C-alpha cells in the first residue's frame, strides 16, 4: 500500500512567500508478496501433474499339457537381436505333416515401404481397418451414437475372422523392439494380440537364421 510522507519543515521564505511542502512516496510491498503466494498456492493445487504412462498387454492363460493349441488366423512374430523380426502364419510345425509343410520363418523390418512391419500389418488388417474407418465416418456424421460406435468397433476387433497376433522374443531381443511392435499393432487397428513364450522349435529356427 502506498503512503505519502509529508515534509513538515515548510516555513515562510524571506519576503513573505509560503514555501510548498515536499512530499515523498513510500510503497509497501507486503500485500504484493501475499498475492504472489496466493497465486502460487492456487496454481500448485489446480495443476495436473504428469502421470507415468503404461501400456496394456494381454498375457494368455498357461496352455494345457500336450501339443500347442492352434490359434485360428494366428500370426506369430519373433523378435531377436539387431532389431530383426521374423514371422510365420498358422500352426507351428517342426516337420511336415498332413496339415502342411514345416514352418519357415519370413523376415520383416521396422522401416517403411516394401518388406516393412507397417506394410505387412496394413495388408493383413485391411478389412478391419476399412470397417473401423466406415464407423468413424458414421460417427463423425452423427449417424452413430458414441456408445454404439464403441460397441461396433469392439465387435469388429473381436471377430473370429480377424487375425490374432502372437508376440514372442528370445533372450537377445530388446524392450524397445517389443514396444515398437505393439505401437505398430495399435496404429494398424489390430484387434487381438498376446505376448507369450517362445517354443524350442521356434528358437531353433531363429538361431538358424541369425547364426546362433
Image: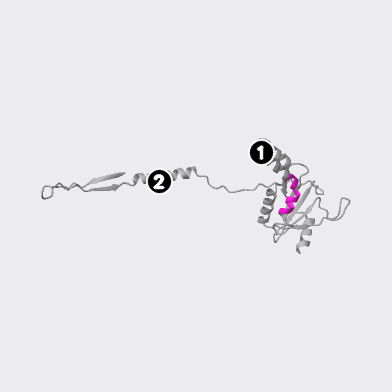
Q: Is residue 185 visible?
A: yes
Q: Residue at x 24, y 46 (%)?
A: 5
Percent across and percent down for residue 19 are 16, 48
Query: Does the magenta run of residues contain 120?
Result: yes
Q: Which residue is mark 1?
A: 139
Of the residues tagged 1 and 2, which is closer to the observer? 1
Does residue 27 sit above or below 107 in this rendering? above
Give left or right: position of 153 versus 38: right
Percent across and percent down for residue 70 are 81, 47
Q: Residue at x 69, y 53 (%)?
A: 181
Q: Is residue 212 visible?
A: no
Q: Residue at x 65, y 56 (%)?
A: 176
Percent across and percent down for residue 121 are 73, 51
> Over which residues does the magenta segment extend?
118-128
Disc 1 + disc 2, Cβ < 8 Å: no
Q: Which residue is mark 2?
A: 36
Q: Secondary structure at mark 1?
A: helix
Q: Secondary structure at mark 2?
A: helix
Does residue 192 sit above or below 78 in this rendering? above
Quadrant containing the N terminus is top left
Circle 2 Cα neighbour tier, 10 Å, few/some/many (<14 / 14–19 / ≥20): few
Instruction: Specify which label sits upstream in the sequence, 1 or 2.
Output: 2
| Residue situated furthest right in the rendering | 98
Amino acid at each position: 500500500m502506498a503512503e505519502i510522507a509529508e515534509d513538515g519543515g515548510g516555513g515562510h521564505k524571506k519576503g513573505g512567500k509560503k514555501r510548498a511542502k515536499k512530499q515523498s512516496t513510500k510503497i509497501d510491498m507486503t500485500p504484493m508478496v501475499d498475492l504472489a503466494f496466493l497465486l502460487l498456492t492456487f496454481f500448485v493445487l489446480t495443476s495436473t501433474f504428469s502421470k507415468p504412462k503404461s501400456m496394456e498387454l494381454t498375457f494368455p492363460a498357461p496352455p494345457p499339457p500336450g501339443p500347442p493349441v492352434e490359434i485360428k488366423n494366428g500370426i506369430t512374430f519373433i523378435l531377436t537381436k539387431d532389431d530383426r523380426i521374423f514371422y510365420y502364419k498358422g500352426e507351428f510345425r517342426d516337420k511336415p505333416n498332413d496339415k502342411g509343410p514345416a514352418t519357415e520363418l519370413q523376415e520383416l523390418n521396422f522401416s517403411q515401404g516394401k518388406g516393412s512391419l507397417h506394410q505387412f500389418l496394413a495388408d493383413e488388417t485391411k478389412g478391419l481397418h476399412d470397417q473401423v474407418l466406415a464407423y468413424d465416418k458414421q460417427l463423425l456424421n452423427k449417424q452413430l451414437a458414441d456408445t454404439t460406435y464403441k460397441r461396433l468397433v469392439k465387435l469388429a476387433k473381436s471377430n473370429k475372422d480377424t487375425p490374432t497376433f502372437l508376440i514372442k522374443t528370445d533372450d537377445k531381443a530388446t524392450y524397445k523392439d517389443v514396444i515398437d511392435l505393439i505401437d505398430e499393432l495399435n496404429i494398424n487397428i489390430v484387434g487381438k494380440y498376446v505376448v507369450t513364450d517362445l517354443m524350442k522349435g521356434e528358437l531353433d529356427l531363429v538361431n538358424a537364421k541369425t547364426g546362433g
